[in-house]
Amino acid sequence: MLEDIDRILIDEETIRRELRRLAAELVKSFKGRDLLVVAVLKGSCVFASDLIRLLPLPLSLEFLAASSYGDGTESRGTVSLRFFSDDLRLAGRSILLVDDILDTGRTLKAVKDRLLEMGVDAVKTCVFLDKAARRAVDLQADFRCFEVEDVFVVGYGLDYAGRYRNLPYIASLRPEVYGGTSENPA
Ligand code: XMP
């Protein structure tokens, strides 16, 4: 696995530091509110797990699965949502929607719109990475850790073909791994 890595873009210490900064910002924003953290599977699992342990707030955690990618690396523009609780209570709660990466923005926008349709008053978005150069819809993250260049990245929950999620840092892969030479493989 490690031989597939081209470059480490964000190392573990930098991630830890930025998470502490983000957590302080979130504590200020959500203090005294009934906070529901909704983590988008699977990519945000590592980010969400690390983040909630830095939030000394009464909160609940919910997961949802949004499918927009298969084994490839291009967003298809449509998402289907799946929740994991039958008794999900959304009304009147402050939702923090957590995702791994904001790329074209289609996934997070579709999820956010669906939550609003379900009667949520307000949804704030929180992403670990922001690939701002690739945005295709009008959506900015309310909270984010890092902006990244337009390179396909893995690690810290992000995968390629289901692998590399367990890398503790953010890295790019050698082009041979995905059989291409472009910066953002199709
Ligand atoms: P959109 O384009 O809808 O896509 O914002 C968001 C989802 O696409 C995946 N994605 C990536 N996954 N490395 C990954 O491992 C990347 O560089 C990358 N860019 C987008 C990711 O699942 C994200 O939630």
Image (tube, rainbow, N blue to C red):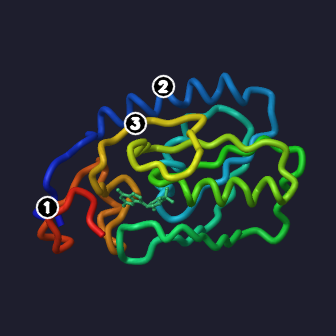
Three-letter amino acid code at the position of disc 2:
Arg
Q: Which residue is mark 3?
A: 146
Give the quarter of the figure containing the C terminus: bottom left
Residue 172 percent across, percent down from the top left: 22, 54
Please name whichever residue, 13 or 40, is drawn nearer the observer in this view of the structure: 40
Q: Residue at x 66, y 59 (%)?
A: 111
Closer mark to the observer between disc 1 and disc 2: 1
State yes or no: discs 1 and 2 in contact (Cβ < 8 Å): no
Three-letter amino acid code at the position of disc 3:
Phe
In the drawing, does residue 72 fall left or right of residue 122?
left
Please name whichever residue, 154 or 54, is drawn nearer the observer in this view of the structure: 154
Q: Is residue 119 above or below residue 82?
A: above
Q: Which residue is mark 1?
A: 174
In the drawing, does residue 140 fall left or right of residue 91?
left
Q: Is residue 68 above or below residue 63?
A: below
State yes or no: discs 3 and 2 in contact (Cβ < 8 Å): no
In the drawing, does residue 171 fall left or right of residue 42?
left
Q: In terms of secondary structure, where does tag 1 sit?
A: loop
Q: Which residue is mark 2?
A: 21
Q: How far, Cα to Cα, is label 3 from label 2? A: 12 Å
Q: In terms of secondary structure, where does tag 3 sit?
A: strand
Closer mark to the observer between disc 3 and disc 2: 3
Q: Residue at x 37, y 77 (%)?
A: 71
